Image (cartoon, rainbow, N blue to C red):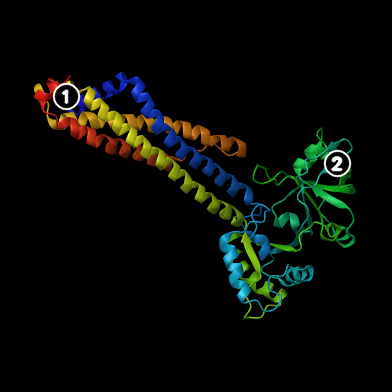
Amino acid sequence: MTLQDSFILAWRTVKSNKLRTGITVAIIAFGIMALIGIITAISAMNQSLKENFSFMGANAFSIRYKEMNARIMGGGGRNQQEFSKEKKGQKEKKSNLDKPIRLEESVYFKDNYGFNRAQVSVYRRGNGNNELRYKNYKTNPQVSMWGGDENYLGVNGYQLDLGRNLNNVDLQSGRNVCLIGSNVATKLFPNNPEKSIDKVILVGGKPYRVIGLLKSKGSSAMMRQDDVIVTSLKNIRQYQNISSSYQIGVMVNNVTELEPAIGESMEQMRKARRLIPSESDNFIIDKSDKFADIFIGLLAGISGAAGAIGLITLIGAAIGLMNIMLVAVNERTREVGLIKAIGGKRKDVRRQFLFESILISILGAIFGIILGVLVGNIFSIVLKTGFIVPWLWVGIGIAICSLVGLVAGIYPAMKAAALNPIDALRYE
């Protein structure tokens, strides 16, 4: 019996036992679907995070107070690695370590940082749940408010669509003027967002004149970069629930200057914070993709859990497949005896049962991969990323299922091959 004959016989047997095959395929498919589905969803999240957390350019970085870097999505939980570093730093505390960045320190840095005509911006975060109104229109209570200077837009990757930027009079007087994101303009001026310029809107009941409309940066469920209102540093100080610390953004001329600029900024910031050589840094320098890396690291744990879920399911499927193949051996004992009686060898019988087991497993893998990719890409639709197929895991899934089929089929195949042809022909 040739290899092709064994394969054809195995395929015919698999097709003839539709119910048994269907149940086993379904068990395997659900295991692979759980694995591929979660991996696909995580890939969509990773892509969305990389796209949306790169709110600054590739040639920009920010300087933050350490405590702000230890919080995820505005919550109170800390990244364990940063928490450990902070604890270590507390042992070295001597003067003003672990204090928020003050305005005087930020201004000192901006005035004295002279790396190759780099742009420096000082800004401060306000409330992130503002509701803005204009006549009968209002936004959702999710608009973030920032106080910045004349360089805030450039350093943070924003561009003006219409109107003007903050000028010296705005910065010195702290008057109620603002720039609004494209989503805000669309909500408040649905018919013609361009007419928002020079209109007076209400921010928490306070009137603000719109002086500029920002170009869209793109928003998603992860980041709402167009739900933003920007005013001056002096103006935002009138609010109660604002950040206790100022932040500093730096944008160099090109990516190749980024690392030297970061090195010089650390030296200049230590001077601004009046740190002596024995004191550790009490500030964090973040590149544009830093937060995305933190989130992706957290999602890696979910990937491990997905693998564990899929593995447990596949172990159960392998046990079920082995039992089904053992039942098939008992049911087809006379068939095995007939094959041996007409000249079939042990390897032919063994090969046929192994092919059956592997075919059932691969069918489960195919259906599971298709369902997993479709289910996982629901997240792609929600997060507005492209259609994602985790090809590496598709290959891994097929390899795992083939291995499952092989392992589950070895014992039944060996048992069938060891049958005595005379006893098998007399089996009832």
> Label for residue 6?
none
Q: Looking at this view, is 129 or 424 the one in front?
A: 424
79 up-or-down from 419: above or below: below
Badge 1 density bin: few <14, some 14–19, many ≥20, Cα 10 Å? many
* Front position among marks 1 and 2: 1
Label 2 Cα crowd, 10 Å radius (few <14 / some 14-19 / many 20+) = many
Q: Amino acid at mark 1?
A: Val
Name the quadrant of the C terminus: top left
Q: Which residue is mark 2?
A: 133
The quarter of the displayed image where residue 276 is located: bottom right
Q: Quadrant of residue 327?
A: top left
Say above or below: 254 vs 322: below
Image x and y of residue 236, in percent: 83, 57
Q: Could one spot residue 244 in this view of the protein? A: yes
x and y percentages locating residue 298 in the rendered image:
55, 52
Earlier-in-chain disc, 1 versus 2 = 2
Along the line of sight, which residue is nearer the eye, 379 or 312?
Answer: 312
Label 1 residue SS = helix
Which residue is pictured at 61% across the width and 72% down the height?
A: 89
55 vs 375, nearest the viewer: 375
250 to the left or right of 237: left
Quarter of the figure that contains the N terminus: top left
Q: Is residue 61 visible?
A: no
Q: Amino acid at mark 2?
A: Arg
Task: Look at 89% across and 47% down and name the residue there.
Answer: 205
Which residue lies most toward the front here?
428
Expressed as whole percent of the image width and height from the top left, the position of residue 104 reads 79, 71
What's the mark number on residue 336? 1
Residue 355 position, x and y percent, is 25, 30
